[in-house]
Every structure is written in structure tokens, then in C-alpha cells.
Amino acid sequence: MKHCTRVITVNTERGPQFIDITDRVQDAIDQSAIRNGFAVVYSRHTTAAIRINENEPLLLQDMESFLERVAPPSAFYNHNDMDHRTVNLTEEEDANGHAHCQQLLLGASETVPVVDGAMLSGRWQRIFLVELDRGRPREVIVQLVGE
């Protein structure tokens, strides 16, 4: 059994934003020696997610609207109350409780089978990095395991 790890850097623009990274994941597979196994695609961030869905513009708008309705940025979040919050604070701290709650619903990773050097995905399936906070550089880890 072999393994290979690649890091994909993605510059996001806004949240929520669905960014199709399927071709970049396939590039990571192509650059590896793995022909059969699986790829774990993982976000290193608690306010960005990895999801598989269809890359259809109106559907992407629907999914962005859904996330904003489920956990709206304008709602109250204890995480955003800097007068009371005392842990994990940085100088550039954002009021992003909504993004953490949205990520809780979406998750940090997807696993995709790899057969003969290609992802074994459905006709319309694409892999997305989902930005939930604000535009910034993000890192996606692609861990390949197989032979």
C-alpha cells in the first residue's frame, strides 16, 4: 500500500462560495503513483468545508442561499461576542460564528474512490471547497492511499 499527500492552495473571494476543485484533485492523482485506492480531500479550516455536488450555477446560488438561511451572518453568536469570549482569539479575529455553524453541517472532508488513475465519480459529481467566512487563501489536503 502506498500513500501520497498533496496540498492545494485556493484563494477564495467571499462566503458562502462554492469553488470547484475537482480538476485540481485529479491533477494530484495524476502526479502520484496511485492508480487504485482512494483520495481523501480535506479542508484544514473550521470555516471552510469540502462537499460533493453538482456544478450548476442556479443550484450553487440555491445552496449559498440555503446556508445563509440556516445560519445567517446577522444572527447572534456567542463566538462573536468579543467582550465575553476569552479563548482562541487573534488580532485579526472575525465575527464568524455563522461560518463555524455552517461548517458543522457540511463537514471537513470527502473520500473518493480512485480506479485506473481516475476518480470514480458520478456524471454530475464535482468536488467543492466551500468558503463560509470571507475571502482568503485556503489549504486543501489531498491524501491518496492505494497501489
Image: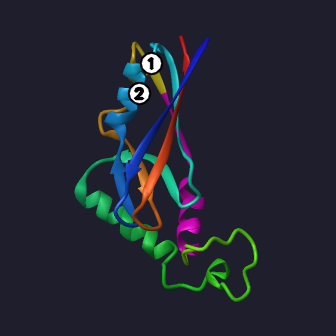
Residue 11 in the figure: left or right of residue 112: left
Look at mark 2 in the image and give the residue it sits on.
28
**Which picture quadrant has residue 130?**
bottom left
- The amino acid beneath tag 1 is Ser
Quadrant for the N terminus, please. Answer: top right
* Cα distance between the residues tagged 1 and 2: 6 Å
- Mark 2 lies on a secondary structure that is helix
Tell me if mark 1 has few (under 14), some (14-19) or many (20+) residues whose alpha carbon lies within 10 angstroms of its own.
Answer: some
The answer to whether 61 is drawn above or below residue 38 in the figure is: below
**Which picture quadrant has residue 64?**
bottom left
For the view shown, which residue lies furthest in the left direction?
Answer: 57
Residue 144 coordinates in the image, percent (x, y): 53, 25
User: In this picture, which residue range is highlighted in magenta?
Assistant: 96-112
- The amino acid beneath tag 2 is Ala
Q: Can you tell which mark lies on residue 32?
A: 1
For the view shown, which residue lies furthest in the front direction?
Answer: 91
Q: Are marks 1 and 2 in contact (CB under 8 Å)?
A: yes
Residue toward you, 145 or 116:
145
Tell me if mark 2 has few (under 14), some (14-19) or many (20+) residues whose alpha carbon lies within 10 angstroms of its own.
Answer: many
